[in-house]
Image (cartoon, grey):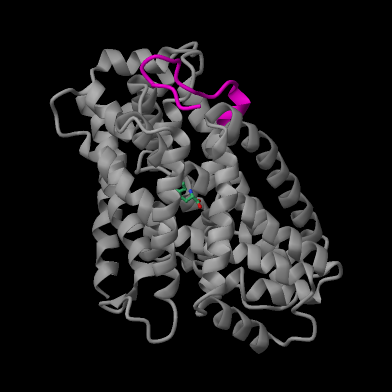
């Protein structure tokens, strides 16, 4: 299977739909369905959504496009692409940071991803029947702070991502994304229909779409900027790696816009699947991270057809996490196979081993009296904070600066020109965002690191 990258054609995506399914698969994850609704809930609803949309256009899309440009120009993994475009420079450090961030995100993300399997099983077997809300909350806390069960589910989850990764880019990632992503859209639409047809659903719809700017704080604006970044999976070379698999026929600008649109639409649909139901049963929408695992089981318990829709919801969350974790793995696989000349399957085995070790420690750091708590944060929190608040913003900032000021303008225009009728619009957009995005990202970063110290 593993042939030398130098002698054979590089694996890559075979169709436009395949690219969008795979990259949207990376972008659409726990961030969209677990985090976006709860930060909307905490920050007062639709005014927050408005700021989020601006953030996507001002910093998310430009960095996404920049990653695609670097990857397709470099035709290699995140480290080598920089070396090829800017030889004898230090810019490939961005790729290195991306590899470190990939391991960190794998560490905590696969733990929550494992929860989705457990919750799928709990709902489909109707295990919450007869529980009150204190019992449901207790169920979650007992499970998440346990020493074995969460680790077992995390390992099962990691093995399932290997199934997708096994066949490579075209016959693995692309093939599965083309089935899983339409499936995800179908499921989310079913859940939205169920939620908005509940009696009393309109209060939830109003909460999402009626702007109340008085509920908006400065923190909310920073949350929106930071989340736009995380939600598009940018800043660590994921989209760069996927970009290196995009054929020269494709228009990168329209591809990036389609992916951002899909990511945003699915986050909004997740809100529409959750809030109308939460309001219909008179439950508090501002419960934070527990929204999905504590609030929602209460909602499904009261809803007619709740067992079915509850199981469907956790299956949705599972698919969303799966295609995201696949893309994180792929960053490291591309690096190891191309730089160390190791076969794909051997690389997968090595990364799996490392991922299991890191995520087990992350999970164990949540057990009572764990010794994996440093400076008041669990190892799990550190992995999250260091990647999302430090490495991704620095990576995104440098990626943006690289494309805007280091790459030869003729190379940049050449990449944008492929498959495009005119690049006037894109160039105008980049002219503005190449200044706006770095400044906004720097602000997010500077406020984000404060969270590390309190
Ligand atoms: N975008 C993913 C989500 O919304 C999370 C994420 C952030 C990610 N960075 C990534 C996923 C890099 C894959 C690769 O849940």
**Quadrant including the C terminus:** bottom left
Q: Nearer the viewer, residue 250 or 245?
A: 245
Asked whether, in this view, residue 46 is left or right of residue 89, the answer is right
Q: Which residues are magenta?
A: 1-20
Tell whether position 188 is magenta.
no
The extreme left residue here reads 88
Asked whether, in this view, residue 450 is left or right of residue 61, the answer is left
Residue 141 vertical position relative to residue 317 in the rendered view, above or below: below
Which residue shows up at 25% across the image and 22% down it?
A: 84
Q: Quadrant of residue 379?
A: bottom left
Residue 264 x %, y %: 56, 45
Q: Nearer the viewer, residue 215 or 233?
A: 233
**Across the whole image, how many numbered discs are drawn on residues?**
0
Q: Quadrant of residue 149?
A: bottom right
Asked whether, in this view, residue 361 is left or right of residue 137, the answer is left
Residue 401 x %, y %: 24, 34
Residue 449 x %, y %: 25, 62
Residue 33 vertical position relative to residue 398 in the rendered view, above or below: below
Residue 324 vertical position relative to residue 333 in the rendered view, above or below: below
Q: Quadrant of residue 428?
A: top left
From the image, give the main secondary structure of the stretch colored magenta. loop
Residue 312 x %, y %: 75, 58
Residue 212 vertical position relative to residue 8 in the rendered view, above or below: below
Which residue shows up at 63% across the image and 82% down it?
A: 139
Q: Nearer the viewer, residue 388 or 84?
A: 84
């Amino acid at each position: 299977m593993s042939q030398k990258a130098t002698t054979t054609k590089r694996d890559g995506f075979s169709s436009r739909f395949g690219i969008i399914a795979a990259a949207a698969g990376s972008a659409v994850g726990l961030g969209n369905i677990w985090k976006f609704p709860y930060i909307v809930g905490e920050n007062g609803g639709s005014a927050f959504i408005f700021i989020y949309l601006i953030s996507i256009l001002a910093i998310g899309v430009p960095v996404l496009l920049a990653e695609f440009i670097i990857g397709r120009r470099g035709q290699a993994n995140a480290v080598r692409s920089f070396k090829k475009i800017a030889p004898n420079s230090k810019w490939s450090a961005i790729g290195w940071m991306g590899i470190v961030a990939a391991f960190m995100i794998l560490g905590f993300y696969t733990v929550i991803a494992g929860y989705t399997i457990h919750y799928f099983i709990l709902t489909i077997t109707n295990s919450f029947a007869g529980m009150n809300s204190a019992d449901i909350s207790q169920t979650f806390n007992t499970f998440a702070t346990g020493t074995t069960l969460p680790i077992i589910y995390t390992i099962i989850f990691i093995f399932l991502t290997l199934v997708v990764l096994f066949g490579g880019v075209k016959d693995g990632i692309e093939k599965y994304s083309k089935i899983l992503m339409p499936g995800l859209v179908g499921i989310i639409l079913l859940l939205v229909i169920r939620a908005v047809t509940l009696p009393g659903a309109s209060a939830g719809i109003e909460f999402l779409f009626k702007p109340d700017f008085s509920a908006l704080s400065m923190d909310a604006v920073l949350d929106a900027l930071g989340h736009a970044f995380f939600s598009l999976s940018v800043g660590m070379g994921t989209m760069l790696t996927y970009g290196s698999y995009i054929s020269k026929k494709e228009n990168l600008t329209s591809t990036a816009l389609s992916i951002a649109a899909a990511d945003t639409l699915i986050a909004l649909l997740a809100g529409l699947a959750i809030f109308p139901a939460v309001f219909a049963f008179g439950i508090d929408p501002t419960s934070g991270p527990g929204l999905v695992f504590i609030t929602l089981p209460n909602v499904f318990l009261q809803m007619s057809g709740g067992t079915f829709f509850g199981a469907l919801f956790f299956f949705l969350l599972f698919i969303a996490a799966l295609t995201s974790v696949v893309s994180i793995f792929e960053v490291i696989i591309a690096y190891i196979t191309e730089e160390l000349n190791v076969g794909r399957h051997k690389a997968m085995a090595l990364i799996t081993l490392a991922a299991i070790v890191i995520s087990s420690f992350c999970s164990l750091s949540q057990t009572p009296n764990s010794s994996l708590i440093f400076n008041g944060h669990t190892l799990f929190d550190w992995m999250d904070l260091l990647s999302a608040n430090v490495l991704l913003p620095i990576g995104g900032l440098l990626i943006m600066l690289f494309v805007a000021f280091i790459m030869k303008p003729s190379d940049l225009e050449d990449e944008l020109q492929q498959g495009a009728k005119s690049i006037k619009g894109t160039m105008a957009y980049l002219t503005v965002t190449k200044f706006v995005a770095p400044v906004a990202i720097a602000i997010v970063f500077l406020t984000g690191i404060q969270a590390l110290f309190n």
